[in-house]
Image: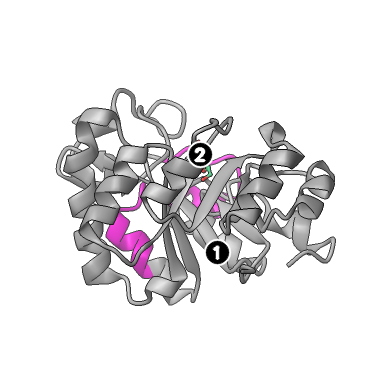
Amino acid sequence: MTFETRVMGHRGAAKLAPENTLASISAAADVGTQWVEIDVTIAADGLVIFHDDTLDRCTNGSGPVKMKSVAELKALEVENQFNPAFSNETIPTLVEALKHIQDLGLSLNLEIKCAQPDVMKIVPDVLAQLAEHWQDKSKLCISSFNHDVLIAVRNIDSDLRLSQIYKAIPNNWPETLSSIHAFSLNCDYALLREETALAIKEAGYLLFCYTVNKPELVQEHWKWGMDAVITDDPSLFFNTGIK
Ligand code: G3P
Ligand code: MG
């Protein structure tokens, strides 16, 4: 099985525009990216696209995201060290992001972020919004570090492509991926070793590595069978002829 792209944008394209905003997704599309990864998390009354548990790093707000309503989150300024044109960006809702990604003709790696007690608060809502607002399951995969999230997704939907994310890959990865009929294993490129990469590919899974921001860092990984990188700046790879 080969994958349709070798380069996915990370948080949209986090080196080109404020991460996880609609502008970041547009920036990824503008440089020719087909797939984008974004993070969905839970707010007090809805689902938003945001990486951290707290607001402090990426906005002018503070405290836990999940304590704020969507209206309160939409009123915040998003940290912008890029183009002044991005200064009106806000934290997108999941539905806004789904619409924008499809309007641009992109495919989506949707990472579900949640603490353990929130698994059944977020998964049914994410799947309900996908069922209503996402057209083509072949242009979608759901990823998470949290295996219980992926089990919950699989229990509701037997078709969706599921990606187990790891930092360091544990020894029980074969059982873990098999139990959810996983599509891919997504891991930190710096911790991946050749023997494990070859075993993942031998087992029939796609292998995606994050967050690769210099093409020269993964020259060996391509030889081991890595299918795609997840990068903050896809143009760095496109400029070297990797598509
Ligand atoms: O899916 C790859 C990557 O996004 C996982 O790490 O922390 O950037 O969401 P993080
Ligand atoms: Mg992520």
Q: Quadrant of residue 44?
A: top left
42 relative position to 223: left or right: left
**Mark 2 or 1, closer to the camera:** 2
* Neighbour tally class for label 2: few under 14, some 14-19, many 20 plus, Cα within 10 Å: some
Q: Are marks 2 and 1 in contact (CB under 8 Å)?
A: no
The one of 68 and 217 positioned closer to us in this rendering: 217
Q: Earlier in the sequence, mark 2 or mark 1?
A: 1
Q: Amino acid at mark 2?
A: Trp
Residue drawn 84% across the image and 48% down it: 219
- Mark 2, residue position: 173
Q: What is the magenta range?
A: 78-99
Residue drawn 65% across the image and 47% down it: 199
Q: Amino acid at mark 1?
A: Trp
- Mark 1, residue position: 35
Label 2, label 1: how many angstroms apart (C-alpha)?
25 Å
Question: Residue 232: x, y in percent?
Answer: 63, 47
